[in-house]
Image (spheres, rainbow, N blue to C red):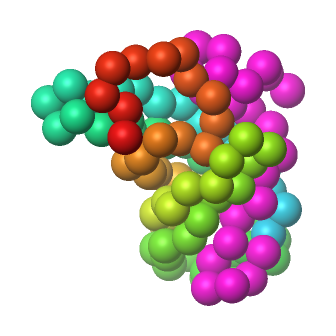
Amino acid sequence: MSEPGADDGYTGPACLVVDGERFDVHVQLRGHFEPIDGRYHWYGRVAAHDALDERLAGAKAAGVLETGTGARPCELAEPDLWGRYRITGESTPPFPVAPSPGIR
């Protein structure tokens, strides 16, 4: 597991909540502050997870991603060929980052 906040990213355990249903997942996340829109954009992959795949059946979904340092709204896109769902968010990320002006 990488150290939270190292290189504006996080790899490790998380909880994904979709329509009130909780899934213990493993995520790999990265992010960056985008000065054009003034927001922090974070993104990554949720490791293949049978119960999550059964629930979503390959469809897009909105959810909340929780790590040990925060919980933030997210969007899930269709899974890739390896069954990993793409996850994105535009907010203060659910992992620590180096201070940057304008993060909201």
Q: Residue at (56%, 23%) from the top-left corner?
A: 97
Residues shaded magenta = 1-22
Find out whether residue 72 is within the magenta segment. no
Seen in the picture, residue 57 relative to 37 is either above or below; the reply is below
**Near-viewer residue (7 or 104):** 104
Residue 62 can be seen in this image: yes
Give the residue at the far left of this rendering: 36
**Near-viewer residue (88 or 57):** 88
Q: Residue at (38%, 48%) from the top-left corner?
A: 90
Q: In this view, does 103 lie to the left or right of 79?
A: left
Counting the numbered discs, the total is: 0
Quarter containing the N terminus: top right
From the top left corner, tell me how far across and down residue 80 is, in percent.
55, 55
Residue 79 can be seen in this image: no
From the top left corner, tell me how far across and down residue 6 is, in percent.
66, 15
Q: Residue at (78%, 20%) from the top-left corner?
A: 3
From the top left corner, tell me how far across and down residue 40 is, in percent.
37, 36
Seen in the picture, residue 18 relative to 7 is either above or below; the reply is below
**Near-viewer residue (26 or 95):** 95
Q: Quadrant of the rendered structure where residue 102 is?
A: top left
Find out whether residue 13 is within the magenta segment. yes
From the top left corner, tell me how far across and down residue 30 is, in percent.
54, 30
Seen in the picture, residue 98 relative to 31 is either above or below; the reply is above
Quarter containing the C terminus: top left
Q: In this view, does 90 lie to the left or right of 7?
A: left
Q: Residue at (40%, 26%) from the top-left corner?
A: 32
